[in-house]
Image: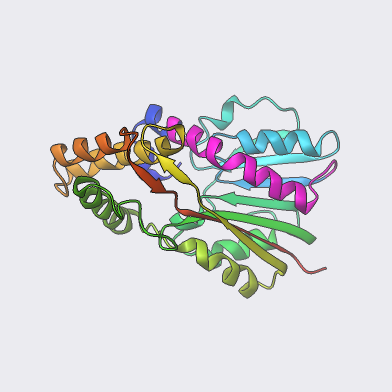
Amino acid sequence: MSEPYARNWTQGRNRLEAIARKADPETQRHLDELGICDGWNCLEIGAGSGTLSEWMAQRVAPGGRVVATDVDTRALDELKAKNLEVRKHDVDKEPLPPGSYDLVVARYLFEWLNDPKKVLQKLVASLVPNGWILIESDDWGALPPPSSGAPEQLKKVREAFFEFLGRSSGYNPDVGRQLVGLLEAAGMESVGATGRSVLLRGGSPGVQLYKYELELVGAQMVEAGKITSADLASALKVYDDPKFCMMSPLTITAWGRKPS
Protein backbone atom coordinates (compact mmCIF):
# COMPACT_ATOMS: atom_id res chain seq x y z
CA MET A 1 0.00 0.00 0.00
CA SER A 2 1.36 3.46 -0.92
CA GLU A 3 2.53 5.42 2.13
CA PRO A 4 -0.06 8.23 1.89
CA TYR A 5 -2.83 5.61 2.09
CA ALA A 6 -1.24 3.42 4.77
CA ARG A 7 -1.81 5.70 7.78
CA ASN A 8 -5.38 4.53 8.34
CA TRP A 9 -5.56 0.77 7.77
CA THR A 10 -9.36 0.53 7.69
CA GLN A 11 -9.74 3.26 5.10
CA GLY A 12 -6.68 2.05 3.24
CA ARG A 13 -8.14 -1.45 3.03
CA ASN A 14 -11.43 0.00 1.74
CA ARG A 15 -9.45 1.77 -0.97
CA LEU A 16 -7.69 -1.44 -2.02
CA GLU A 17 -11.00 -3.25 -2.26
CA ALA A 18 -12.45 -0.41 -4.34
CA ILE A 19 -9.47 -0.63 -6.72
CA ALA A 20 -10.08 -4.37 -7.10
CA ARG A 21 -13.76 -3.86 -7.92
CA LYS A 22 -12.83 -1.25 -10.51
CA ALA A 23 -9.88 -2.99 -12.13
CA ASP A 24 -10.17 -6.78 -11.78
CA PRO A 25 -12.61 -7.54 -14.64
CA GLU A 26 -10.56 -5.68 -17.27
CA THR A 27 -7.23 -6.98 -15.98
CA GLN A 28 -8.53 -10.55 -16.01
CA ARG A 29 -9.75 -10.13 -19.58
CA HIS A 30 -6.33 -8.89 -20.72
CA LEU A 31 -4.54 -11.74 -18.94
CA ASP A 32 -6.82 -14.29 -20.59
CA GLU A 33 -5.94 -12.72 -23.96
CA LEU A 34 -2.23 -13.10 -23.14
CA GLY A 35 -2.89 -16.81 -22.58
CA ILE A 36 -2.51 -17.30 -18.82
CA CYS A 37 -3.01 -21.00 -18.15
CA ASP A 38 -2.09 -24.06 -16.10
CA GLY A 39 1.61 -24.27 -15.38
CA TRP A 40 2.52 -20.57 -15.56
CA ASN A 41 4.64 -19.09 -12.78
CA CYS A 42 3.38 -15.57 -12.06
CA LEU A 43 4.40 -12.55 -10.00
CA GLU A 44 2.18 -9.66 -8.95
CA ILE A 45 4.09 -6.66 -7.64
CA GLY A 46 2.09 -4.38 -5.33
CA ALA A 47 -0.70 -6.93 -5.04
CA GLY A 48 -2.89 -4.79 -2.76
CA SER A 49 -5.98 -6.67 -1.63
CA GLY A 50 -4.83 -9.84 -3.40
CA THR A 51 -7.98 -10.52 -5.41
CA LEU A 52 -6.12 -10.60 -8.73
CA SER A 53 -3.41 -12.89 -7.34
CA GLU A 54 -6.10 -15.27 -6.11
CA TRP A 55 -7.71 -15.28 -9.55
CA MET A 56 -4.35 -15.94 -11.22
CA ALA A 57 -3.68 -18.79 -8.79
CA GLN A 58 -6.90 -20.45 -9.93
CA ARG A 59 -6.00 -19.94 -13.62
CA VAL A 60 -2.52 -21.49 -13.36
CA ALA A 61 -3.45 -24.40 -11.05
CA PRO A 62 -2.56 -27.13 -10.52
CA GLY A 63 0.86 -26.89 -12.15
CA GLY A 64 1.59 -23.19 -11.77
CA ARG A 65 2.15 -20.81 -8.90
CA VAL A 66 1.73 -17.15 -8.02
CA VAL A 67 3.93 -14.92 -5.86
CA ALA A 68 2.10 -11.86 -4.50
CA THR A 69 4.25 -9.06 -3.08
CA ASP A 70 3.67 -5.70 -1.43
CA VAL A 71 5.36 -3.41 1.06
CA ASP A 72 2.34 -3.99 3.33
CA THR A 73 1.03 -7.57 3.25
CA ARG A 74 -1.74 -7.35 5.84
CA ALA A 75 -4.46 -8.00 3.27
CA LEU A 76 -2.38 -10.58 1.40
CA ASP A 77 -1.69 -12.61 4.53
CA GLU A 78 -5.36 -13.64 4.50
CA LEU A 79 -5.07 -15.40 1.12
CA LYS A 80 -5.47 -19.18 1.26
CA ALA A 81 -4.69 -20.59 -2.21
CA LYS A 82 -2.17 -23.45 -1.91
CA ASN A 83 -0.21 -22.32 -4.99
CA LEU A 84 0.02 -18.68 -3.85
CA GLU A 85 2.98 -17.35 -1.88
CA VAL A 86 2.94 -13.94 -0.15
CA ARG A 87 6.15 -11.96 0.23
CA LYS A 88 6.82 -8.59 1.81
CA HIS A 89 8.91 -6.78 -0.79
CA ASP A 90 9.85 -3.25 -1.87
CA VAL A 91 10.55 -3.41 -5.60
CA ASP A 92 12.14 0.07 -5.51
CA LYS A 93 14.90 -1.20 -3.22
CA GLU A 94 15.06 -5.00 -3.31
CA PRO A 95 16.08 -7.47 -6.06
CA LEU A 96 13.96 -10.06 -7.83
CA PRO A 97 15.08 -13.56 -8.85
CA PRO A 98 16.12 -13.50 -12.53
CA GLY A 99 14.52 -15.72 -15.17
CA SER A 100 11.77 -16.98 -12.85
CA TYR A 101 8.33 -15.97 -14.15
CA ASP A 102 6.13 -16.48 -17.19
CA LEU A 103 4.08 -13.41 -16.26
CA VAL A 104 4.67 -10.29 -14.18
CA VAL A 105 1.76 -7.96 -13.33
CA ALA A 106 2.02 -4.49 -11.78
CA ARG A 107 -1.14 -2.45 -11.24
CA TYR A 108 -1.27 1.11 -9.89
CA LEU A 109 2.41 0.87 -9.00
CA PHE A 110 4.42 2.82 -11.56
CA GLU A 111 2.92 6.18 -10.60
CA TRP A 112 4.57 5.81 -7.18
CA LEU A 113 8.04 4.63 -8.23
CA ASN A 114 11.16 6.69 -7.71
CA ASP A 115 12.77 5.24 -10.87
CA PRO A 116 10.26 3.48 -13.18
CA LYS A 117 12.95 2.57 -15.75
CA LYS A 118 15.12 0.85 -13.16
CA VAL A 119 12.18 -1.08 -11.70
CA LEU A 120 11.03 -2.16 -15.15
CA GLN A 121 14.51 -3.53 -15.82
CA LYS A 122 14.13 -5.69 -12.70
CA LEU A 123 10.72 -6.92 -13.81
CA VAL A 124 11.95 -7.78 -17.30
CA ALA A 125 15.00 -9.58 -15.90
CA SER A 126 12.70 -11.68 -13.70
CA LEU A 127 10.87 -13.04 -16.76
CA VAL A 128 11.75 -16.21 -18.64
CA PRO A 129 12.31 -15.82 -22.40
CA ASN A 130 8.94 -15.15 -24.10
CA GLY A 131 7.43 -14.22 -20.73
CA TRP A 132 4.83 -11.46 -20.53
CA ILE A 133 4.60 -8.29 -18.46
CA LEU A 134 1.33 -6.38 -17.95
CA ILE A 135 1.24 -2.93 -16.35
CA GLU A 136 -1.79 -0.80 -15.49
CA SER A 137 -1.84 2.81 -14.35
CA ASP A 138 -4.27 5.70 -14.42
CA ASP A 139 -3.45 8.72 -16.55
CA TRP A 140 -5.14 11.78 -15.09
CA GLY A 141 -3.72 14.09 -17.74
CA ALA A 142 -5.24 12.23 -20.69
CA LEU A 143 -8.75 13.52 -19.91
CA PRO A 144 -10.19 16.65 -18.30
CA PRO A 145 -9.53 16.33 -14.55
CA PRO A 146 -12.44 15.29 -12.32
CA SER A 147 -12.66 18.86 -11.14
CA SER A 148 -13.37 20.11 -14.67
CA GLY A 149 -16.90 21.47 -14.67
CA ALA A 150 -17.28 20.51 -11.02
CA PRO A 151 -18.31 22.78 -8.17
CA GLU A 152 -15.59 25.17 -7.13
CA GLN A 153 -15.02 23.46 -3.77
CA LEU A 154 -14.08 20.16 -5.42
CA LYS A 155 -11.95 21.82 -8.09
CA LYS A 156 -9.91 23.64 -5.47
CA VAL A 157 -9.31 20.56 -3.33
CA ARG A 158 -8.50 18.19 -6.23
CA GLU A 159 -5.87 20.58 -7.58
CA ALA A 160 -4.31 20.77 -4.13
CA PHE A 161 -4.59 16.97 -3.82
CA PHE A 162 -2.35 16.26 -6.84
CA GLU A 163 0.12 18.97 -5.89
CA PHE A 164 0.36 17.52 -2.36
CA LEU A 165 0.88 13.92 -3.58
CA GLY A 166 3.52 15.04 -6.05
CA ARG A 167 5.49 16.96 -3.47
CA SER A 168 5.13 14.50 -0.59
CA SER A 169 5.40 11.17 -2.43
CA GLY A 170 6.62 11.84 -5.94
CA TYR A 171 3.29 10.72 -7.39
CA ASN A 172 3.16 10.98 -11.21
CA PRO A 173 -0.45 11.39 -12.40
CA ASP A 174 0.54 11.16 -16.08
CA VAL A 175 2.52 7.90 -16.03
CA GLY A 176 -0.10 5.91 -17.94
CA ARG A 177 0.83 7.42 -21.30
CA GLN A 178 4.50 6.61 -20.65
CA LEU A 179 4.05 2.85 -20.24
CA VAL A 180 4.34 1.88 -23.91
CA GLY A 181 7.55 3.88 -24.31
CA LEU A 182 9.00 2.35 -21.16
CA LEU A 183 8.25 -1.19 -22.37
CA GLU A 184 9.75 -0.53 -25.79
CA ALA A 185 12.85 1.07 -24.28
CA ALA A 186 13.26 -2.03 -22.12
CA GLY A 187 13.48 -4.17 -25.27
CA MET A 188 10.06 -5.81 -25.02
CA GLU A 189 8.35 -7.17 -28.12
CA SER A 190 4.65 -7.37 -29.12
CA VAL A 191 4.04 -4.19 -27.10
CA GLY A 192 0.45 -2.98 -27.03
CA ALA A 193 -1.93 -0.93 -24.91
CA THR A 194 -5.54 0.04 -24.43
CA GLY A 195 -7.23 2.85 -22.52
CA ARG A 196 -10.58 2.94 -20.76
CA SER A 197 -12.64 5.67 -19.08
CA VAL A 198 -16.21 5.60 -17.79
CA LEU A 199 -18.75 8.17 -16.68
CA LEU A 200 -19.31 8.16 -12.93
CA ARG A 201 -22.11 9.69 -10.86
CA GLY A 202 -21.84 11.02 -7.35
CA GLY A 203 -22.92 8.54 -4.71
CA SER A 204 -22.26 5.53 -6.97
CA PRO A 205 -19.89 2.64 -6.14
CA GLY A 206 -17.63 3.74 -8.99
CA VAL A 207 -16.90 7.13 -7.48
CA GLN A 208 -16.27 5.68 -4.01
CA LEU A 209 -12.60 4.98 -4.78
CA TYR A 210 -11.89 8.65 -5.37
CA LYS A 211 -13.77 9.60 -2.23
CA TYR A 212 -11.69 7.13 -0.17
CA GLU A 213 -8.50 8.60 -1.61
CA LEU A 214 -9.57 12.16 -0.89
CA GLU A 215 -10.58 11.25 2.66
CA LEU A 216 -7.22 9.65 3.39
CA VAL A 217 -4.95 12.20 1.76
CA GLY A 218 -7.23 15.14 2.58
CA ALA A 219 -6.74 14.58 6.31
CA GLN A 220 -2.98 14.87 5.78
CA MET A 221 -3.48 18.01 3.67
CA VAL A 222 -5.50 19.61 6.47
CA GLU A 223 -2.80 18.66 8.96
CA ALA A 224 -0.16 20.23 6.69
CA GLY A 225 -2.21 23.41 6.29
CA LYS A 226 -2.76 22.97 2.54
CA ILE A 227 -6.57 23.08 2.82
CA THR A 228 -9.05 23.63 5.64
CA SER A 229 -11.29 20.98 7.16
CA ALA A 230 -14.25 22.91 5.75
CA ASP A 231 -12.72 22.73 2.25
CA LEU A 232 -12.36 18.96 2.60
CA ALA A 233 -15.88 18.44 3.91
CA SER A 234 -17.35 20.48 1.03
CA ALA A 235 -15.39 18.52 -1.58
CA LEU A 236 -16.38 15.14 -0.13
CA LYS A 237 -20.02 16.22 -0.12
CA VAL A 238 -19.85 16.72 -3.91
CA TYR A 239 -18.88 13.07 -4.37
CA ASP A 240 -22.12 12.07 -2.62
CA ASP A 241 -24.33 14.21 -4.87
CA PRO A 242 -26.08 12.03 -7.50
CA LYS A 243 -26.34 15.06 -9.80
CA PHE A 244 -22.53 15.24 -10.02
CA CYS A 245 -20.93 13.51 -13.02
CA MET A 246 -17.23 12.94 -13.75
CA MET A 247 -15.14 10.95 -16.19
CA SER A 248 -12.85 8.48 -14.53
CA PRO A 249 -9.14 8.87 -15.30
CA LEU A 250 -8.01 6.98 -18.39
CA THR A 251 -6.82 3.58 -17.21
CA ILE A 252 -3.96 2.45 -19.45
CA THR A 253 -3.24 -1.26 -19.72
CA ALA A 254 0.08 -1.96 -21.45
CA TRP A 255 1.83 -5.24 -22.16
CA GLY A 256 4.91 -6.69 -23.81
CA ARG A 257 6.75 -9.98 -24.31
CA LYS A 258 10.39 -10.62 -23.45
CA PRO A 259 12.40 -11.71 -26.51
CA SER A 260 13.30 -15.38 -26.77
Residue 214 percent across, percent down from the top left: 31, 41
Residue situated furthest front in the rendering = 243
Examine the image and state in which quarter residue 216 appears.
top left
Left or right for 243, reference 28: left
Q: Residue at x 80, y 50 (%)?
A: 35
Location of residue 189 with respect to 146 vertically, above or below: below
Looking at the rendering, the stretch of residues picked out in magenta corresponds to 14-39
Location of residue 5 with respect to 176 vertically, above or below: above
Any magenta on residue 100?
no
Examine the image and state in which quarter residue 88 appears.
top right
Decide if residue 98 is in sight here.
Answer: no
Any magenta on residue 29?
yes
Left or right for 187, reference 63: left
Residue 233 percent across, percent down from the top left: 20, 35
How many tags in the picture?
A: 0
Q: Nearer the viewer, residue 236 or 57?
A: 236
Q: Nearer the viewer, residue 81 or 199?
A: 199
Q: Residue at x 57, y 42 (%)?
A: 23
Location of residue 165 with respect to 22 vertically, above or below: below
Q: Residue at x 37, y 59 (%)?
A: 144
Characterize the magenta stretch by its predominant secondary structure: helix
Q: Nearer the viewer, residue 246 or 127?
A: 246
Q: Quadrant of the C terminus?
A: bottom right
Left or right for 147, reference 116: left
Decide if residue 167 is in sight here.
Answer: yes
Q: Residue at x 17, y 49 (%)?
A: 226
